[in-house]
Image (cartoon, grey):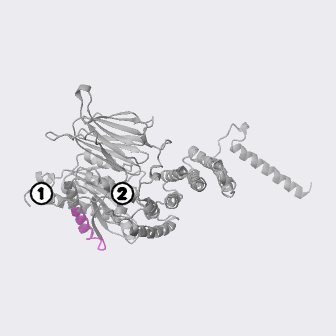
Amino acid sequence: MKKAEITRFIQIMLLATSTMLALACLGGGQATGEAVPSAQVLLHSGDVCRKGLLQSPEKRKFRENWLACIGTYSRIYTLYPDKDESAWALYHAARLYRDMFEVSRLPCDIDEALKLFQRLLDRYPDHRLADDALFGMADIHETQRKDFTQAYLEYLKVTIRYPDGDMRPFASKRLDVLSKVMSRQKGTASSGGGKGVAAPPEESAPRERDAQPGKAPSGKARVTDIRYWSTPSYTRVVVDLSAPVSYKEHLLKADPDAHKPRRFYLDLENAVVPAEISPVIPIKDDLLQKARAGQYDKDTVRVVLDMEKVGRYKVFHLYDPFRIVVDIQRLEEKEPAAAAPKASAPTKRPVQKGVRKAEKSSKDSVSLARQLGLGVNRIVIDPGHGGKDPGCSGYGGLREKEITLSLARVLAAEIKKELGCEVILTRTKDVYLPLERRTAIANMEKADLFISLHVNAHRDSRVNGLETYFLNMALDENAMMVAARENATSEKSISDLQNILNDLMMNTKINESSRLAYQVQGGMVKRLRRGYKDLKDLGVKQAPFYVLIGAQMPAILVEIGFITNGSERKRLPTATYQSRVAQGIAAGIKAYVQEMTAAYKGG
């Protein structure tokens, strides 16, 4: 045999051997005991399938070809969730769904793409593909959904969370383009009283797509959970849904003859309650006995709360995910019970309406605390973000959740030393807390003040300074963007939220929160300028922050600096800066208490 023939024979044998081994790894060899394919082999198989599909116009016509490639990737992130290959599989599967939408035009394909991108972000927030996934979500909102405000927010997150990522320059360019687009739209929007960036004219009305991402197969929203936090004097119940719904609230008097307690119930329109949701949730705290959820009719879910000694209650909704919050307070002696609305005219709360301006009191009301001369004895401090929610991120792995927790501990010690108050932290370690739970903690602890700590961010790295917020409607676009970021929702949802603020806020709480905000802002600026001459005072502002909604005490949100600014990014994690911020906040609280006491004594 000639040398060339021998070489050719060896090459053939090697090729045959490698092919047999590959088939065995892929499960094709029965004699090997159906070996489970490795993550690397599956990823290679998925990549071959994907590239072959995208290069063949004929293959792209048939949905089963797309799903076959996606199925291979899904095996990876199902079988090997801890492997690096899973992140790549999620990313490629999400892109395949996005590309398949261009052929199918089925909204469910876009929904799946968004879900997989989000899963990648949740599972692998520090992976090299995380910024690509976030950019992919922004691109879908911009190009496929034409939701420019949500796209703007997602691109902004790319620049803030992943400043070192390779997608940051691309996101910055898209932000510049969208800024011009939305500015033009704002100029052509209706002349109503709404603030912030206007939605495209053709999208100013509620859109069906807003309700599609969590819909059940029937097209209805699903009740996904019912949560509660409760004490004998205060209870907060949260109904989680997969998509926005309209709802009606009712309050029925007790019926002793029928052995029925007072009942409050919500009727959720165009919704279903899955079998896995427990129909009865016992609470038994002498205020709320139990919660029940059931399918009242084919289009309506009824959530019933059996209650005792109920005084006041509030109902409102939040977004991303959509949930309905019910706050219930105990009936105090000599306090009239909440009146039940007539059965023929239940209160109805549609999800989308135009923006209303808050009514301003012509008289500066005096709070009950001022009238009675009550002091400040208990303060709840809320370190923003935590756990799976890192907040804003900066260069070098600096994360907002770590800064706020560190500062909260320093502030707690400073307040105890200077004011002698009891201090409670909403979290003492790196755990995730829903925004609605943070306020519930303050209410359950009967706090006198609530202070939420945060770190700011801006796409312009030159922006810097301190600012303090209290709950009200946003009066400028920057405040709207800060609220959208801290609420983890879109500006459009913020605009819709402002519709319900009149029903949620009492003038005394607004006025007291405003006074506290001004004193804290002044205390921080005064203390910090002693060591940082370039410190910028951005002042006191107002915006609809989820974490402040429903607080039964003066409540503020403090932004202690910009993680996106070079100088402040270096200061934020240092013990010196945090100590001075804490001293400034404590001094502001002390000044607030002194002002309140002076007013009570006749000042």
Q: Residue at x 11, y 59 (%)?
A: 599
Mark 1 sits on what residue?
Answer: 597
Q: Please name the amino acid that badge 1 sits on.
A: Thr
Q: Position of residue 588 (x, y in %)?
A: 21, 61
Left or right of 72, for residue 564: left
| Residue range corresponding to the magenta coloring | 518-536
Residue placed under numbered mark 2 in the picture: 494
Question: On the image, which quarter does residue 569 sit in?
Answer: bottom left
Horizontal and vertical percent for residue 240?
39, 44
Q: Secondary structure at mark 1?
A: helix
Quick one: quadrant of the C terminus?
Answer: bottom left
Q: Is residue 82 above or below residue 403?
A: above
599 with respect to 149 (left or right): left
Q: Residue at x 32, y 53 (%)?
A: 547
Let me know if residue 430 is in the magenta part. no
Q: Quadrant of the N terminus?
A: bottom right
